[in-house]
Image: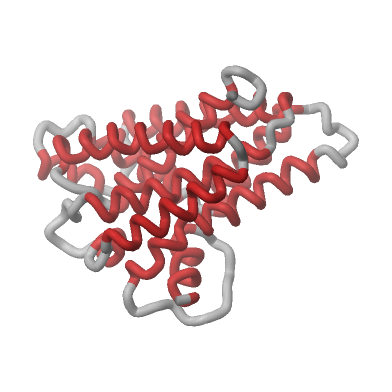
Amino acid sequence: MLKGLVTAIRTLTIIPVPGKEGEDFSSALPWFPVVGLILGAILYVVALLWELLPFDQWAWGCAIALSAVSIWLTRGLHMDGLADWADSLGGFDRERRLAIMKDSSLGAFGVMALVLGIIFKLVAFERVVLSGTYAILIIIPVISRCMLVELQTTLSYARSEQGMAGVFIANAKNRHRIVAHICALVICIFSGLDGIFLYASGFAVTLFLKGMFRRQFNGITGDLLGASNEIIEIVLLMMAAIPGTMIL
């Protein structure tokens, strides 16, 4: 069972962990929210450590640190997916969009998506730092990783050839989905009404993305999962940032 956790951590982060990965990659899916919890806890610690520095009042500095650590811990994997998906918007049919996403070169749409994504996160992080609502930093990564499981267990793999996401989707079962949602919900419930509200909002965004990906690609890919993670996190971070305090 713990082999699935090892697989999940090694897939979603750069964090080195001992142990052997499971042969069935889908066994990692229920652990995705736990990996989100680990990432969120690290961001939470970064925010707390920043308060110990002599320039702790520099909120933008902390926002930059949070963004950099978030990208570094995930190898920029999700940002890459966001850029590839944005570039695919220039395609006129499913096969063309899939081909564009597979191309390693970065287009204009991809650059704009990356820049906007980083700006949105910086603005949201700065607001979170100023308001001191650090719990948001833990909750949102849990929700976004849970929603990746929702997409992988309810959509088919869009490519005919095997890819990174394909090995997870191949044996994905509804039980993986249920466990992931229960895990995320428990964490969100401990956070109070704000956590529950953010979970419901993240699920609503996921349903929208699911419908869009069905129309555009008739399924899901690794790049689309990465894009989804970034979109969900940005939406939830902005929702938490706008009031400047805990939402409810």
Q: Quadrant of the C terminus?
A: top right
Task: Report which quarter residue 164 is drawn in.
Answer: bottom left
Which of 109 and 37 lies nearest the eye of the viewer?
A: 37
Which of 62 and 1 lies nearest the eye of the viewer?
A: 1
User: Where is residue 195 drawn, in percent x and y?
Assistant: 55, 37
Residue 136 in view here: yes
User: Where is residue 136 drawn, in percent x and y?
Assistant: 61, 37
Number of numbered labels in the structure image: 0
In the rendered view, would you say 132 is above or below 104? above
Residue drawn at x 23%, y 49% is 220
Say left or right for 24 vs 64: left
Residue drawn at x 66%, y 51% is 42
Residue drawn at x 57%, y 18% is 242
Say left or right for 39 vs 236: right
Say left or right for 247 vs 144: right
Q: Quadrant of the N terminus?
A: bottom left
In the rendered view, would you say 229 is above or below 121? below
User: Where is residue 106 drawn, in percent x and y?
Assistant: 34, 40
In the rendered view, would you say 103 is above or below 91? below
User: Where is residue 142 drawn, in percent x and y?
Assistant: 51, 48
- Colour convention of the picture: secondary structure
Residue 119 in view here: no
Direction right: furthest residue? 54
In the rendered view, would you say 146 is above or below 116? below
